[in-house]
Image (cartoon, rainbow, N blue to C red):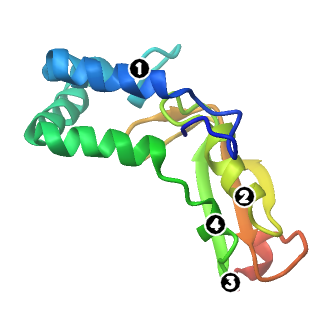
Amino acid sequence: MLKTAKNPDSLPFEVFDQIRTNVFKDRSQFFKDLTTPFFGANRPGAQVSEGVRGSFWSQGMQASFKSVIDCIQAFSETDFTDDLTKFDVPTLILHGDDDQIVPIGASAMQAASHCRSYYNRECMPDVVGASGMRDRGWHVVDADCSEPRRTDVRSRVK
């Protein structure tokens, strides 16, 4: 997620530093505000209950300041690029195309591009996920790094 020489299309350090500042300033409000983009509550037609939002807030508030700050660092600065090139088993990456926290272009599509082959297709449009999040569509990326060819994940289901 962090903009680096190896990842020039991602977000600058200042974005994540602002997140840390908001946590220190008012952790409770930070977690309350985060529920809006996290669950897509700001999208037309979204139906996210106060119960779901309150549960998210409660879980966030149970975490220590240190664990929240460490999570932000891990979320933004961990680079799995070298690990992805070593995968030798079929790998399925699922990611919603309307993720407001972790954009698909900076995560799933980047991950797939580091494997020798991948399959990308849109499926299940307008699905409401198990957590109540609504995505405009889902992308399925099958990154089979052991075979230098495009594959269709459906061909592996027997």
Quickly name the residue at label 2.
112
Quickly name the residue at label 4.
82
Q: CA distance from mark 4 to mark 1?
A: 35 Å
Q: CA distance from mark 3 to mark 4?
A: 13 Å
Query: Looking at the image, which residue is at 18% across and 22% down?
Result: 24
| Label 3, residues with CA under 10 Å away: few <14, some 14-19, many ≥20 | few
- Measured as percent of width and height from the top left, residue 58 is found at 12, 34
Label annotation for residue 101: none
Residue 101 position (above or below residue 24)? below
Describe the element under mark 4 as helix, strand or loop: helix
- Measured as percent of width and height from the top left, residue 156 is found at 74, 81
Q: In the figure, is residue 138 to the left or right of 71?
A: right
Q: CA distance from mark 2 to mark 3?
A: 13 Å
- Measured as percent of width and height from the top left, residue 106 is found at 64, 39
Label annotation for residue 88: 3
Instruction: Name the amino acid type tagged 3.
Output: Asp
Nearer the observer: mark 4 or 1; the answer is 4
Label annotation for residue 41: 1
Work out whether mark 4 precedes mark 2 in sequence or the reverse, and give the earlier one: 4
Q: CA distance from mark 4 to mark 2?
A: 12 Å
Instruction: Name the amino acid type tagged 4.
Output: Asp
- Measured as percent of width and height from the top left, residue 136 is found at 63, 31
| Label 4, residues with CA under 10 Å away: few <14, some 14-19, many ≥20 | few
Quadrant showing the N terminus: top right
Describe the element under mark 2 as helix, strand or loop: helix
Instruction: Name the amino acid type tagged 2.
Output: Ala
Q: In the figure, is residue 116 to the left or right of 135?
A: right
Task: Using the image as rendered, state which of residue 39 and residue 61 is in the foreground.
Answer: 61
Work out whether mark 4 precedes mark 1 in sequence or the reverse, and give the earlier one: 1
